[in-house]
Amino acid sequence: MIGRLLLTLACLALILAQLPAHLAGRLLAAACAERCRLATTSGTLWRGQGQLYIASDKDWHALGLLAWQLPAGDALARARLEQGQIVWSAPGRIDIDGISLPAAALLSQPELDLPLGSWQGTLQLKATRLQWALTSKTTRANGELHWLGAASGLLGERPLGDYRFDWHWDGETADAAISGGRPGEIRVAGRLDPPRLHGGIELQGEAGRFLAPYLSLLPGLAGNDEDGRYTVDYRWH
């Protein structure tokens, strides 16, 4: 009797160990309401890889090769997406670094309710950590979000430079320090402290002549076109 039970458990373990990687694709698609997909998968559910795609509006964006392993040495799980990685390093902690995706893949998501436009550039998560207590539903997080090669069809697809958002989420509210621009043309420094966005914008040369009419549409803007210096202090409810 005991021998038969052990044999059954061994067979079950062998079956589980060989579950195909395409099952991870099904689980991922269900978790993101069919807005992300894994294609051309190989390996097993526990150690595999596949091409990751994410939908925004009517387009699908290729994010690159996603490879995963669980468990992974000293971590509960580890995944790599091109040059970036996600590490589930402890029961209540996930670390993310170097994960990149097209700006259009995120900024065109209907849930964000942003103006439609051809968002351009690359969004990159760096030094990001999510933490939670096993006895609580509250999740805290902080990290860096970089927007590299920023541009938008809303602004004539003019290159806007690179920007950095140092953000923090305490489980209830978020805040962020914003900095960046395009050398010799655009400089931005400010803060997002909901429900307030405040800071300064400096435009020089051709960038000032091109972008000034767009800036005049921003709420809470003060300044003038002569020296290209503006301040923003906007509150929403």
Image (cartoon, rainbow, N blue to C red):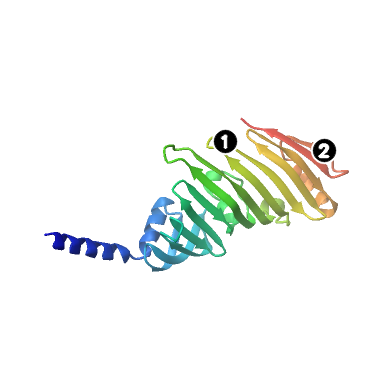
x%, y% of residue 223? 82, 38
Mark 1 lies on residue? 173
Q: Residue at x 68, y 43 (%)?
A: 177
Residues at marks 2 and 1, CA–CA distance in whole angstroms:
30 Å
Q: Quadrant of the N terminus?
A: bottom left
Residue 77 horizontal side relative to residue 193, left or right: left
Residue 158 horizontal side relative to residue 82, left or right: right
Mark 2 lies on residue? 223
Q: Residue at x 73, y 50 (%)?
A: 180
Provide the secondary structure element on which disc 2 rests: strand
Dot 2 surroundings within 10 Å: few (below 14), some, or many (20 or more)?
A: some
Provide the secondary structure element on which disc 1 rests: loop
Question: How many numbered marks have been drawn onto this rendered protein structure?
Answer: 2
Amino acid type assigned to the residue bearing label 2 in the image? Gly
Q: Residue at x 45, y 66 (%)?
A: 50
On the question of residue 82 being in view, the answer is yes
Residue 70 occupies which quadrant of the picture? bottom left
N-term-proximal mark, 2 vs 1: 1
x%, y% of residue 227? 87, 44
On the question of residue 214 being in view, the answer is no
x%, y% of residue 51? 47, 66
Q: Quadrant of the C terminus?
A: top right
x%, y% of residue 109? 54, 49
In the picture, the disc for residue 135 is none
Residue 17 occupies which quadrant of the picture? bottom left
Amino acid type assigned to the residue bearing label 1 in the image? Thr
Q: Closest to the observer: 93 or 190?
A: 93
Q: Closest to the observer: 6 or 227?
A: 6
Q: Nearer the viewer, mark 2 or mark 1?
A: 1
12 over 218 or under it: above or below: below
Dot 1 surroundings within 10 Å: few (below 14), some, or many (20 or more)?
A: few
